[in-house]
């Protein structure tokens, strides 16, 4: 593992930023996560090793964005292309964070990171050069849709970091797209800070090509009366790991999450979520779906933490899973940690197959088995896809998924 060897033998380098040096120092004593710990015990060691077995590429090759802009008002950014943005309009403004603002915020977050639980973030920040870090401060309302792309180049590892501040009373739709080229690894860390009365509809769509890998970490802090809505979809990666950490810093905030991962062949894709309520009257509604076919492996582990200060929390976490093969594997573990005594919390998990009675009924009406299966999958996919802030005429994800399965 080329990257791990570099971490172990790292010496002071004048070209490294202060953040890179801090993260490398935290990683040097234990460069890899503990495989026996709960967040990593199911991770395929061989596939993680393959993720790390590339040279870091700080300069991206140019790539063609697969979807054309359907509106001139859409704001589209690519991390790593030295994009400069400063939009100040009557109703809104979007400006880049200064280097000092970025450094201060990221260093503050790092101070709370431990080597094992936050390994993916520490690795990402130790590898992300200045050109591959994008920080935005968004203010106002009636903001055009924002699309932000990250991509990996073939035969290399690319590390990208995104930091977004949503100012008070801000309302925005933002779509992130992670693209993996053949024989590549992409490390993506995203940090959201939602200030009071702000809201965001956040979409994350990740898909790769043959033998592509992804580590995708999402870190969200919500202040009072903020609303964070996340719709996510991950598919076509040899190895992918999506880590979601959300903290309602003072309660009185709303979080809605709907995510899905789709695995085929011998792929492994996993989602780990940790939702912390640090004040009263918090709300969470979470649904995660996994679909596994062939000899693939899908994983979901979710944790809801409700301390004594978080009275009157209303939280729900549901894991719904679909097995399409006798050789595929799904592991799911939704869990609650509750100390507060005045709460309404629930969690559950289901694992099933395509409904044989429905398939038989459709086939008696002249529908082929393949088309009948697509109709069932369409219903299964649509709940998640409809929650992702995308334009159907440009991003027909449902059609893409049905043609893949």
Image (cartoon, grey):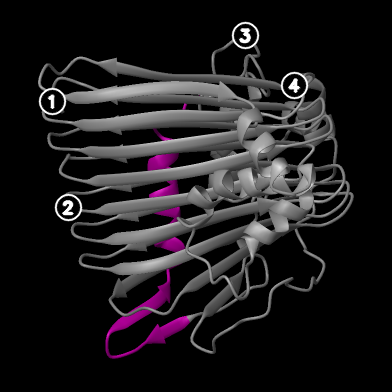
Indicate which disc, 2 or 3, sits on the residue closer to the N terminus.
3
On residue 225, the disc is 2
> What residue did someone put label 4 on?
44
Q: Secondary structure at mark 1?
A: loop
Q: Hey, which quadrant is residue 324 in on the image?
A: top right
Does residue 200 lie above or below 313 as drawn? below
Label 2 neighbour load within 10 Å: few <14, some 14-19, many 20+:
many
At a point 16% along the width and 28% down the height, the residue shown is 310
Label 1 neighbour load within 10 Å: few <14, some 14-19, many 20+:
some
Instruction: Give x and y (percent) for residue 209.
Output: 83, 51
Q: Secondary structure at mark 2?
A: loop
Does residue 86 lie above or below 329 as drawn? below
The range drawn in magenta is 86-114
> What residue did someone put label 1 on?
309
Look at discs 2 and 3 and give the one toward the viewer. 2
Instruction: Give x and y (percent) for residue 266.
Output: 83, 29
At a point 45% along the width and 26% down the height, the residue shown is 302
Indicate which disc, 4 or 3, sits on the residue closer to the N terminus.
3
Q: Is residue 122 visible?
A: no
Horizontal arrangement in the rendering, residue 234 relative to residue 348 (left or right): right
Q: Residue furthest top?
A: 36
**Distance from the alpha carbon under mark 4 to that under mark 1:** 37 Å
At a point 17% along the width and 40% down the height, the residue shown is 250
Residues tagged 1 and 3 counted as in contact (Cβ below 8 A) = no
Indicate which disc, 4 or 1, sits on the residue closer to the N terminus.
4
**Distance from the alpha carbon under mark 2 to that under mark 3:** 38 Å
On residue 36, the disc is 3
Tell me the quarter of the image containing the C terminus.
Answer: top right
């Amino acid at each position: 593992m080329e990257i791990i060897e570099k971490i172990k033998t790292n010496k002071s380098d004048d070209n490294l930023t202060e953040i890179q040096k801090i993260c490398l120092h935290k990683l040097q004593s234990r460069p890899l996560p503990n495989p026996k710990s709960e967040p990593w015990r199911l991770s395929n060691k061989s596939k993680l090793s393959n993720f790390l077995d590339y040279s870091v590429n700080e300069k991206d090759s140019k790539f063609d964005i697969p979807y054309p802009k359907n509106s001139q008002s859409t704001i589209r950014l690519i991390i790593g292309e030295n994009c400069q943005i400063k939009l100040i309009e009557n109703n809104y403004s979007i400006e880049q964070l200064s280097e000092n603002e970025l450094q201060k915020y990221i260093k503050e977050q790092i101070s709370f990171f431990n080597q094992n639980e936050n390994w993916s973030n520490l690795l990402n920040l130790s590898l992300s050069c200045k050109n591959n870090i994008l920080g935005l401060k968004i203010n106002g309302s009636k903001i055009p849709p924002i699309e932000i792309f990250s991509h990996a180049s073939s035969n290399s590892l690319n590390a990208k970091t995104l930091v977004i501040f949503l100012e008070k009373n801000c309302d925005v739709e933002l779509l992130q797209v992670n693209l993996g080229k053949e024989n590549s690894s992409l490390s993506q860390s995203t940090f959201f800070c939602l200030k009071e009365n702000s809201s965001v509809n956040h979409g994350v769509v990740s898909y790769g090509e043959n033998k592509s890998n992804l580590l995708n970490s999402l870190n969200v802090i919500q202040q009072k009366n903020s609303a964070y809505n996340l719709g996510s979809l991950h598919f076509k990666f040899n190895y992918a790991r999506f880590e979601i950490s959300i903290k309602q810093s003072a309660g009185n905030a709303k979080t809605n999450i709907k995510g899905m991962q789709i695995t085929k062949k011998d792929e492994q894709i996993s989602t780990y979520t940790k939702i912390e309520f640090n004040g009263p009257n918090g709300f969470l509604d979470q649904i995660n779906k996994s679909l596994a076919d062939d000899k693939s492996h899908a994983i979901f582990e979710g944790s809801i933490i409700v301390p004594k200060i978080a009275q009157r929390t209303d939280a729900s976490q549901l894991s719904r899973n679909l097995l399409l093969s006798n050789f595929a594997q799904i592991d799911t573990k939704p869990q609650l940690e509750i100390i507060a005594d005045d709460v309404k919390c629930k969690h559950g998990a289901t694992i099933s197959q395509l409904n044989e009675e429905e398939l038989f009924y459709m086939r008696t009406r002249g529908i082929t088995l393949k088309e009948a299966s697509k109709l069932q999958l369409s219903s299964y996919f649509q709940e998640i896809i409809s929650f992702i802030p995308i334009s159907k005429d440009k991003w027909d994800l449902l059609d893409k998924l049905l043609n893949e399965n």
